[in-house]
């Protein structure tokens, strides 16, 4: 269980010199800082995610996807830690454009079809990556989804797991982790094997929401080849999950305020029955 790249990692073909830690600390936030992490932009080339709450495996995931697929992801320029401050740094390509969340209301039906078809090809390509035979992160490390989080390492809850049965047991154990009812956990053990099924692990983004899709766009239309470059960001939770995980997590993130919910089946294999149970589990186990 180790890093899949040699750390610290520095790319050789940089668009400009890497920012210093002083530059990074002074840079403006892109999103609200939380959980011991900040995301900042520096000039026209760089976005930096850093802090004690940042896991460098996110950068490893992007390097893996970039190497193994044709899916556009931000280029990773550096992965390193500062042992004195205990902060981790991911310096990556800044993608100019709008998130799909902000862009979606502006798209016509044809443009939505184009974006959906593009994302479908991306997720189909992810599913073709060969399974390593476990449920976990790259390098046979624990899963990074919050459902499997514990304050101190606990492999029975964190993983990696050698079977789907072990994944379900981990969710039951997580329910009692904070002192909740053992009877509810036993109910999970009784019913979830009949409701959730997975023949093996598949590589999963793990947080498929429109805010994690960037669409650089020209002045005419995203349907024009020059204006369409759908880029998937935020690979923090990615890893080898059950086959239903991507769709179910996407349903959990729905706002139900527009037609996005009706497009999910055009991009992901649907697991409608599993998603109803998964939403309840997610609300109970998320930390």
Image: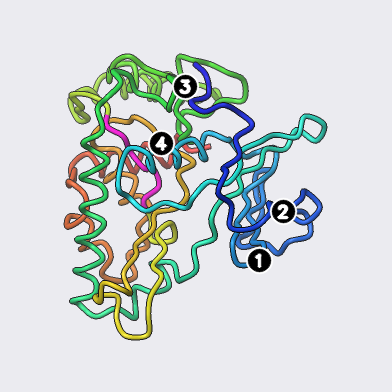
Quick one: label 3 or label 4, which is nearer the N terminus? Answer: 4
Point 72% across, 53% down: residue: 19
User: Under tag 1, what secondary structure?
Assistant: loop
What is the crowding at mark 2: few (fewer than 14 residues within 10 Å), some, or many (at least 20)? some
Tell me the CA gap for discs 1 and 2. 9 Å
Q: Are marks 1 and 2 in contact (CB under 8 Å)?
A: yes
34 and 252: which one is in front? 34
> Which mark's residue is nearer the viewer, 2 or 3?
2
- Relative placement, left or right, of 56 versus 286 is right
Residue ID for mark 1: 43
Secondary structure of the residue carrying numbered label 3: loop
Q: Secondary structure at mark 2?
A: loop
Distance of mark 1 from mark 3, alpha carbons? 34 Å
Pick the residue in front: 158 or 30.
30
Residue 199, position as x, y percentages in the image = 18, 24
Specify few, some or many for label 3: CA neighbours under 10 Å numbering under 14, 14-19, or 20 or more: many
| Label drawn at residue 141 | 3
Q: Indicate whether residue 147 is drawn in magenta.
A: no
The residue at which mark 2 appears reads as 19
Range of magenta residues:
202-208
**Placement of 146 over or under 91, stated as above or below:** above
**Mark whose residue sits in front, 1 or 3:** 1
Cα gap from disc 2 to disc 3, whole angstroms: 30 Å
Secondary element at image label 4:
helix
The residue to which callout 4 is attached is: 64
N-terminal of the two: label 2 or label 3? Answer: 2
Q: CA distance from mark 4 to mark 2?
A: 24 Å
């Amino acid at each position: 269980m180790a890093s899949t790249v040699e750390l610290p990692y520095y790319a050789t073909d940089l668009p400009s010199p890497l920012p210093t830690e002083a530059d990074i600390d002074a840079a403006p936030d892109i999103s609200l800082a939380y959980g011991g992490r900040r995301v900042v932009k520096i000039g026209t080339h760089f976005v930096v995610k850093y802090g004690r709450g940042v896991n460098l495996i996110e950068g490893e995931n992007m390097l893996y996807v970039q190497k193994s697929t044709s899916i556009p992801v931000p280029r990773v320029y550096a992965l390193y830690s500062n042992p004195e401050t205990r902060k981790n740094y991911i310096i990556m390509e800044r993608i100019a454009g709008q998130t799909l969340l902000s862009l979606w209301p502006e798209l016509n039906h044809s443009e939505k079809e184009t974006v959906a078809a593009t994302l479908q090809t991306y997720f189909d390509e992810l599913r073709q990556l060969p399974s390593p035979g476990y449920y976990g992160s790259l390098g046979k490390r624990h899963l990074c989804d919050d459902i499997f989080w514990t304050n101190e390492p606990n492999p029975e809850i964190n993983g990696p797991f050698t079977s789907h049965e072990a994944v379900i047991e981990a969710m039951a154990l997580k329910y009692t982790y904070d002192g909740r009812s053992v009877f509810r956990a036993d109910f999970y053990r009784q019913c979830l094997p009949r409701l959730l099924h997975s023949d093996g692990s598949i590589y999963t983004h793990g947080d498929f929401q429109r805010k994690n899709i960037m669409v650089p766009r020209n002045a005419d239309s995203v349907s024009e080849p020059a204006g369409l470059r759908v880029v998937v960001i935020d690979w923090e939770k990615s890893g080898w999950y059950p086959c239903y995980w991507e769709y179910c997590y996407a349903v959990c993130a729905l706002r139900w305020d527009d037609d996005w919910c009706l497009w999910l089946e055009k991009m992901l294999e649907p697991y409608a029955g599993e998603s109803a149970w998964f939403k309840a589990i997610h609300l109970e186990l998320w930390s």
